[in-house]
Structure formats: structure tokens, C-alpha cells
Amino acid sequence: MAQKALILLNMGGPNNLEEVGLFLTNMFNDKNIITVKSSLLRRFIAFMITTSRTKKAQGNYAKLGGKSPLVGYTQKLVDKLQMALPDLHVNFAMRYTPPFCEGVIRELMEKDIQNVILLPLYPHYSTTTTKSSLEDFYDVAASLGYNGQINTIKRFYENTLYNQLIVKKIEEVLSHNDASQIELIFSAHSLPQKIVDKGDPYQQEIILHVKMIETLLHVRNLHFKATHIAYQSKLGPVKWLEPSLEEKLASLETKNALIVPISFTIDNSETEFELSMEYAEVAHALGFERYMVAKCPNDDDDFVACIKNLVLNVGRGC
């Protein structure tokens, strides 16, 4: 029986159309997402957002087959990791939809696993993602009386294997196209500007990450016409990180773009619906000749190798 465990963490996504409301309710009740001090006000804001967005969101997920693809891809990744790391018990938990941390932690207790590595599947650290997922695990563990040793991997955008994989994903979608004629856009999930202004390192890590990937692209002799960073998925009237992806697309003179979902490791509604459907329509309306979207790492064997590398280096200062 395994004495250690690797638990992957992510935000989650609806497993069916009925879970869309649950997903939105849990997400907007997260104090790391809606940062008002009053829990009562947060619940009211969450209720208003959920009420206004559920039907539209259900329609979007219906176009993806009635559910988020995130859980399915994650399960495939876990299955591969279990084979690659036979001495570990590998599982995953989601923040806002099943499977939740409670079931995963109860399983750890039943198996008497006292040493856990947590890997939030966000390459860059943010209070809205990494911190939120880790706090959720710690809080549930404390409520259940789980006292095992917990190690965390809080970011991995600097990992060489991971960045080589991102370059591979770019090459796969680029195919025979001439890179010098294409604008490369790294699209990251946006954040309210006020969260970044309070010290969240997310935007700075995105900028550093893109510079690292640019270096690797040059080594591979891939020279795009230009490289950009843009932000997607903003919500509400507050100021968000800029430029938005729509603004960036509209500003390009060259009507050829390759989009890299830089802040996502697993394909989800923001990539397979928003980027691959909604923004594809925007690009078409703008007269784009080519609009391409790179796949996320998902269960790629190279992502398995990257995670194995991260796990083996836990505690070594890597």
C-alpha cells in the first residue's frame, strides 16, 4: 500500500448542466474571488451573479456536450501519473465542483496515508487560484482531523520540461504555417486590477513566463511576426487586466494569430468554448485568415514527465 500521495488540485467545472449553478455559487462565494470583507455581502453578490449567468453558462456548456471537459482530462492525467509514479497514491480534487477535497481526504485517512504532495494545476501563483485551492484543502483536512505531512508545489512556470512542452504544443498547432507571418498571443485568464495592485504576483509571473518561452522558441528557430500578452474571461464592471484578447485581436494588422492559453494546464470551457468558439467568431468577423488555438498540456506524456520531475524534486529546493 502506498505511504505517500500526490493530489492534483484545480478549480473544477460542471459535470452536467445541473451543476452549473453549483459551480457559479461556490466560485463567487470564495473570499479569494469576491474579496469584500462582509460574508453576507459576498453571498448576495454571488447570488446575483449566479442568478444572472446560470442560463447563459448552461447554454455554453451545452455546446461542449453538456459538461466541462476539465474533469475528464484530469482523470486521464491522473491515470497516467499513477502508472508513472507507482509508489504514490494519485488522485485529484476540485475547488467548486465534485470531486471535492472531502472525499479525497477521507480516502487518505482510510488508507492511512500520512505524507501528501499537493500540486495545484496552475503554473503561476495567484491568490484566486493557488491560494484558494490550498486553503480549501487545509481547511477541510483540519475539519476532518487529518494530520498528515503536507508539501506543496505552488508554481511551476519556470520548469524547463513544462516550457518545452508549451513550445511543443505551439509547434503542433503551427504545423506547416510560416511563423514569421503569424502573431503569437499568450492569453491568460484575467484578474481584477485591484487584486494585482494588492500584491498578487500572477501578472508578473505571466510576463516572466512568456519571456522564457520566447527564448525557447528562438532556440527552436521559431520567429513569430510579433508576440503579445492578452487577458480573457473578465466579468463585471470593475477594471481588469488589459488588454483584453478581443482588444488585442482588433489591434492586429496581420490577420493571422496563434493563441496560447498560457495560464491553463487542462482544457476547459475557457479554452474549448471561449477561445476555440467565441473568439474564433470574433476573429472571423475581423477578417482573420488564420486563427489557431494551441491545446493545453492535458494528459500529454510530456506533462506526466514534468509532474514526475516536480514531485521528485519536492524538498530539494527546486
Image (spheres, rainbow, N blue to C red):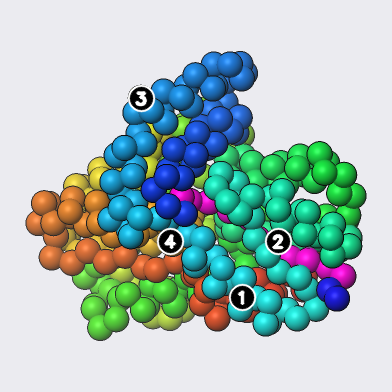
The part of the image, by quadrant, that contains residue 291 is: bottom left
Sequence-wise, which precedes: disc 4 or disc 1? Answer: 4
Is residue 127 visible in the rendered image? The answer is yes
Residue type, mark 1 in image: Asp
Seen at 78% across and 73% down, the residue is 88
First reached walking from the N terminus: tag 3 or tag 2: 2
Up-down relation of residue 178 to residue 19 (above or below): below
| Residue 20 occupies quadrant | top left
* Residue 140, numbered label: none
Q: Where's the N terminus, which quadrant?
A: bottom right
Q: Which residue is mark 4?
A: 69
Based on the picture, tell me whether residue 13 belongs to the magenta stretch.
yes
Residue designated by label 1: 79
Of the image marks 4 and 2, the number of the one nearer the N terminus:
2
Task: Quickly name the residue at label 2.
Answer: 7
Amino acid type for the residue under numbered disc 4: Pro
Amino acid on which the number 2 mark rests in the picture: Ile
- Label whose residue precedes the other's in the sequence (1 or 3): 1
Q: Relative to the observer, which residue lies in front, 248 or 97?
A: 97
Check if residue 25 falls in the magenta segment.
no
N-terminal label among 3 and 4: 4
Secondary structure, mark 3, is loop
In the image, taking residue 306 as reference, residue 113 lies left or right, namely right
Residue annotated with mark 3: 237
CB contact under 8 Å: marks 4 and 2: no
Badge 1: few (under 14), some or many (20 or more) residues near its Cα, within 10 Å? Answer: few
Marks 1 and 3 sit apart, C-alpha to C-alpha, by: 41 Å
